[in-house]
Image (cartoon, rainbow, N blue to C red):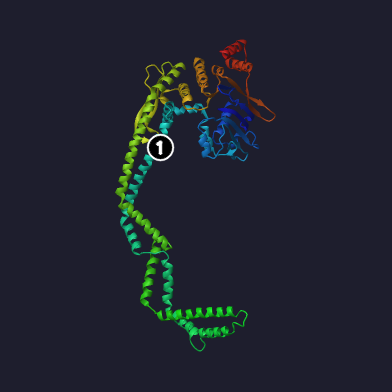
Amino acid sequence: MLKSLSISNYALIDKVNINLENGLTVITGETGAGKSVLLGALSLILGNRSDLNALLNREKKCVVEGEFFVGNNGLREVFENNDVDFEEDTIIRREILPSGKSRAFVNDTPVNLQFLKDIGSKLIDVHSQHQNLLLDDVGFQRMVVDAVADNRSLQSDYHKSYKEYKTVKNQIDELIEENNKQKDDLDYLQFQFVQLDEANLVEGELEELEKQLQELSHVEEIKVNLAEVTNALTEEPRMVVDSLRDALAKIQKIESFLHDGEEVAQRIESAYLDLKDLADDLGTRVEDLEYDPLQIQKVQDRLDLIYSLQKKHHIESISELIELKDNLQSQLDKINFFDEELNQLNKKLTDLEKLLKQKAKKLSDSRKKVLPLVKSTVEKQLHALGMPHANFVVQMNATEDYLPYGIDHVEFLFSGNKNGSPSAINKVASGGEMSRVMLSIKSLLSSAKGLPTIIFDEIDTGVSGEVADQMGVIMAEMAKAMQVVSITHLPQITVKGSHHYKVFKTDNEHTTVSQIKKLTHEERVVEVAKMLSGSTLSDAAMENARILLKN
């Protein structure tokens, strides 16, 4: 329920604080006093878009803050999924800055407007005249039946299977579409794959081939230089290896007298052995090196093949070519094993459809059970609301396909005249009749939906007398199970309220502002008397007001 509402610098409101309670609260005031402004401010914390023009003072920010008792209203998971602290007494705040920027907070945690809408729709149902248009919405009509039948669990279970069913159905459609497309390209895909497969590409091969070609192309130059190095190490007139061997012998003679003679000898011996080994290795390589034009051509051809494949497929490495080959293999496998995959998916779809059909039937059966209750309850309310011949029909027909909500098309039909033929409500009902039908439906939903608060914004427009009195009775009855707020201009409804607020205008130094106050019993008597007789109060009007309030 809405415990309090604080508004500052919004439209005609400078600063207002309202504390609300359980039961039926009525809000009255002259036309233009600012009753709709309250709803406009409330809509901001329910996730509606802000408007910079709504600021009373363009140099100050607008702040709207509401405190809600959330209790066990099934919102904890929504809060946790959005990383917002859950509190049973939750505070929602919306700010509009002079710059036009809007900010929203829930329990001091910044949130987006979608989150406000998600939780707001579960906290308050604001019913205004335009909401009567919902009576022409088949989605709303189906929702009414589901709410009365308490189909939340069945709907959730059905929708889960429906999503699985649609996923597999889409997979089949995509598989067929992809296969048809790839069949046209089969020969080209096969040609590309064979070309890459026959190339027998190996990771790192390109770099190795390029090095090999460099060596083969410069073999004579390499051979000459290696031979000269070998000769320098092992041939006359001054062999480096023999010189090191002689030096080693000389050091060994004096190493016992030299303080680091052993270390020097070891270093010369190491250099001698390394150079001797190097000389032997270089000599062997010189003998093995030969200019081989056939091998050069073989390496060059291999490189040309790799380069051409890279250029053809617009890629720069062998690893990418290998990855491309694997992708082509996967596409070819999909084509070759299409029938097998399609059969598996079709079998899965058949099993899911069988399960979906069972769940859809359960949902339909549950809806059918409450159709008489919906009809009788709404008609009973309508008869009490001055429509003795009202005929309300809930028509339910099966759809051709499985839909997200089941296989039922629900439609409300209505006739307000004796022996009239029921038709779609929007075609035969007047504005006043639609208001009464919607009030009857909201009364039916009040306990079924579990909404803690409902606000009626002048739902009594177009009615008076006994009908208005009965409207007040219905609202008061609804208020036994939930918080009901009614913005009204009729005394018959006003006197049914447990709490009465009046919206009025006052003038300050700079402008006219709206204010709201909770009326005492005597102030209520005066307000109701004015609603009965106008601004000129008579003793009869005052007495009548006292009787109405007492009753």
Question: Residue at (42%, 32%) from the top-left corner?
Answer: 153
The quadrant in which residue 345 appears is top left
Q: Is residue 402 above or below residue 529?
A: below
Question: Residue at (36%, 72%) from the top-left corner?
Answer: 298
Residue 221, visible in the rendered structure: no
Three-letter amino acid code at the position of disc 1 = Lys
Residue 132 drawn at (x, y percent): 47, 26
Crowding near the residue tagged with mark 1, few <14, some 14–19, many ≥20 C-alpha atoms within 10 Å: few
Judging by the rendered image, the residue that carries numbered circle 1 is 160
Question: Residue at (56%, 17%) from the top-left corner?
Answer: 495
Q: Is residue 398 left or right of residue 72?
A: left
- In the depicted view, which residue is nearer to us: 481 or 127? 481
- In the depicted view, which residue is nearer to us: 136 or 324? 324
Q: Is residue 205 above or below residue 134?
A: below
- In the depicted view, which residue is nearer to us: 317 or 473? 317
The quadrant in which residue 46 appears is top right
> Furthest-bottom residue in view?
237
Residue 233 drawn at (x, y percent): 50, 83
Disc 1 on helix, strand or loop?
Answer: helix
Q: Is residue 87 above or below residue 333?
A: above
Numbered circles on residues, count? 1
Residue 183 drawn at (x, y percent): 31, 52
> Furthest-front residue in view?
256
The quadrant in which residue 262 appears is bottom right
Residue 75 drawn at (x, y percent): 51, 33
Quadrant location, the N terminus:
top right
Q: Is residue 440 left or right of residue 505?
A: left
